[in-house]
Image (cartoon, rainbow, N blue to C red):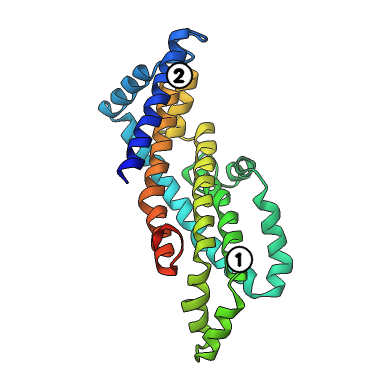
Amino acid sequence: MKKKIIKQIIFYSALLILWQVVVQLKFWPGYIFPSPFKVFETIIAGFKDLSFLIAIGVSLKRLFIGYGISIIFGFTLGILISKFKFMEETVGGLVLGLQTLPSICWLPLALLWFGLHEQAIIFVVIMGALFSITIATESGIRNVSPAYIKAGRNMGAKRTTLFLELIIPAALPYIISGLKQGWSFAWRSLMAGELLFGNLGLGYLLLMGRELNDMSQVIAVMLMITLISLLIDKLVFGRIEYNIRRRWGVGKGI
């Protein structure tokens, strides 16, 4: 663990040094490509005047609402598609097709339905994450080994018990992968919505940075988004994956 931390420190320190070297070579003007020190000053100033804290709070609120709804509907839809042939032959193909649709394509529809309101951004977030969660859930359930199901039936497990206590746990690796992918898609959808008309969020700060030619603010917001995503992945998805590996006796979780 200590070696891993040391490697990460060396790696990111090297990136910062390389960044500063490129700035010193002046390939671009300072207002286009600011130094890491300038970006760090912007981050400090953003937290001092609370603009970053407010933006993070607003964006995370929208993100968690939309992502939470997409988990509920995606998980339910994935189960239905995996269990009913009619759903597979109809809705399954539609979900697969809509998965390839960029989330920004949902924004005009959201604006027509909800107007310039929070609901429009949340709708785009939902549509951005929903289908990846649905497909992962459906794939996970379908790829459960028949041997597990036969063993459960031989031990007297009824249909509901078999599904809840065997099939769903066995499908969790697929489902967690879908949740992680849905989380990244939700972020992209959120930024797309906030860049176009959202206020007070991180996307709005990105937009203001662009309008004011303040590249240090743009990069600072990008770093905030990256750090928040890494933190969630480490504290939430990472822990869940570790527990799954440990329970099933595979990988580093043994």
Q: Secondary structure at mark 1?
A: helix
x 51%, y 45%: residue: 184
Circle count: 2
Mark 2 / mark 1, whichever is N-terminal: 1
Is 158 drawn above or below residue 56 in the view shown? below
Image spot of residue 28 (x, y percent): 51, 10
Q: Nearer the viewer, residue 110 or 7?
A: 7
x 28%, y 30%: residue: 50
Residue 249: quarter of image: bottom left
x 73%, y 66%: residue: 90
Image spot of residue 198 (x, y percent): 48, 35
Q: Which mark is residue 195?
A: none
Image spot of residue 81 (x, y percent): 64, 69
Tell which tag, 2 or 1, sits nearer the viewer.
Answer: 1
Do we see residue 201 in this rendering? no
Q: Nearer the viewer, residue 76 or 82?
A: 82
Q: What is the three-letter code of the residue carrying label 1?
A: Glu
Q: Which residue is mark 2?
A: 215
Q: Which residue is mark 1?
A: 138
Circle 2 crowding by C-alpha within 10 Å: few under 14, some 14–19, many from 20 = many
Q: What is the three-letter code of the residue carrying label 2?
A: Met
